[in-house]
């Protein structure tokens, strides 16, 4: 499968617990779940790729549904939550398709494109959505149920860092692979260390901590977030100069 140079990529995993939304993920009509985002992308003629453990389907207008065999690829990570599995899936897809130049990785069901982003994406710059409060006030980000070194770093900077939200993640293929690759490395290391008996590497269910940790720790001088990238989180803004609306 050949992929276009500028794309939007989402992941939708079925038949696993949705620990955040608590929705039934069996017998899901995936096209209807992502219809709003797919329609917004069609307005800008942007191809939309959706990775899922459901069988691949025929392309529907601008939407390509691509099957990922979780059992075959991620058998060593069977106890990871859907949020961590999404990282692995997006990382491998970008690795497998060097024809991709720029991409936006978005939450499947609550993000829409408001303005075309790719002609404004600069090399070696990571663009992320954010939330209107510090890390200290983010329940999913600032929790002790994560590797100790991540918790300690976020604690030290909890009043300085605005909470980043990986539901909107934009950049060149190279920087996205770098960002996701660091998370894959840290997640793999955490699973190994915990299995060896080091409980300080325990992983919680959410990806917010590691997403913020990697962005601020490794990309602080190459990171852009705010209203250029996404609307106010949960602001339900239909008109904005931002690239994406996130809730």
Image (cartoon, helix red, strand yellow):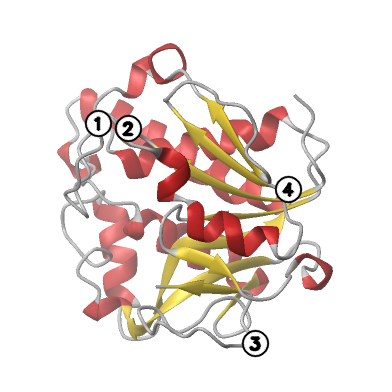
Which residue is located at x 19 percent, y 69 percent?
139
Q: Where's residue 116, x and y in %?
A: 73, 70
N-terminal label among 3 and 1: 1
Q: Name the residue under label 4.
A: 173
Q: In this view of the protein, can residue 165 be seen by the observer?
A: yes
Q: Of discs 1 and 2, which sits in the foreground?
A: 1
List the single residue furthest toward the top: 72
Disc 2: CA contacts within 10 A as few (<14), some (14-19) or many (>=20): some
* Residue in front for this viewpoint, 142 or 133: 133
Whole-angstrom CA distance, mark 3 to mark 4, is 24 Å
N-terminal label among 1 and 2: 2
Q: Name the residue under label 2.
A: 14
Element class at badge 4: helix
Which residue is located at x 30 percent, y 78 percent?
158
State whether residue 175 is above or below residue 31. Answer: below
* Residue in front for this viewpoint, 164 or 112: 112
N-terminal label among 3 and 4: 4
Element class at badge 3: loop
Q: Of discs 2 and 4, which sits in the foreground?
A: 2
Element class at badge 1: loop
Q: Where's residue 219, x and y in %?
A: 60, 64
């Amino acid at each position: 499968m050949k992929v276009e140079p500028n794309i939007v990529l989402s992941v939708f995993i079925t038949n696993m617990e949705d620990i955040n939304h608590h929705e039934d993920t069996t017998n899901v009509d995936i096209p209807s779940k992502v219809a709003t985002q797919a329609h917004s992308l069609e307005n800008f003629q942007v191809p939309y790729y959706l990775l899922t453990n459901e069988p691949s389907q025929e392309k529907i207008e601008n939407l390509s549904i691509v099957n990922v065999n979780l059992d075959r690829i991620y058998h060593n990570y069977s106890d990871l939550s859907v949020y961590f599995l999404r990282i692995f899936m997006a990382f491998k897809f970008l690795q497998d398709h060097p024809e991709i130049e720029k991409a936006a990785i978005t939450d499947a069901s609550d993000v829409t494109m408001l303005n075309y982003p790719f002609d404004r994406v600069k090399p070696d710059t990571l663009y992320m959505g954010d939330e209107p409060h510090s890390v200290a006030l983010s329940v999913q980000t600032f929790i002790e149920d994560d590797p100790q070194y991540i918790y300690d770093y976020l604690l030290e900077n909890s009043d300085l860092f605005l909470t980043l939200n990986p539901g909107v993640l934009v950049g060149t293929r190279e920087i996205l692979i770098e960002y996701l690759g660091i998370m894959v490395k840290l997640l793999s290391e955490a699973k190994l260390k915990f299995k060896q008996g080091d409980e300080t590497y325990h992983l919680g269910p959410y990806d917010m901590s590691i997403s913020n940790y990697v962005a601020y720790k490794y990309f602080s001088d190459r990171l852009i977030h705010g209203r250029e990238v996404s609307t106010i989180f949960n602001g339900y803004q239909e008109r904005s100069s931002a690239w994406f609306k996130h809730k």
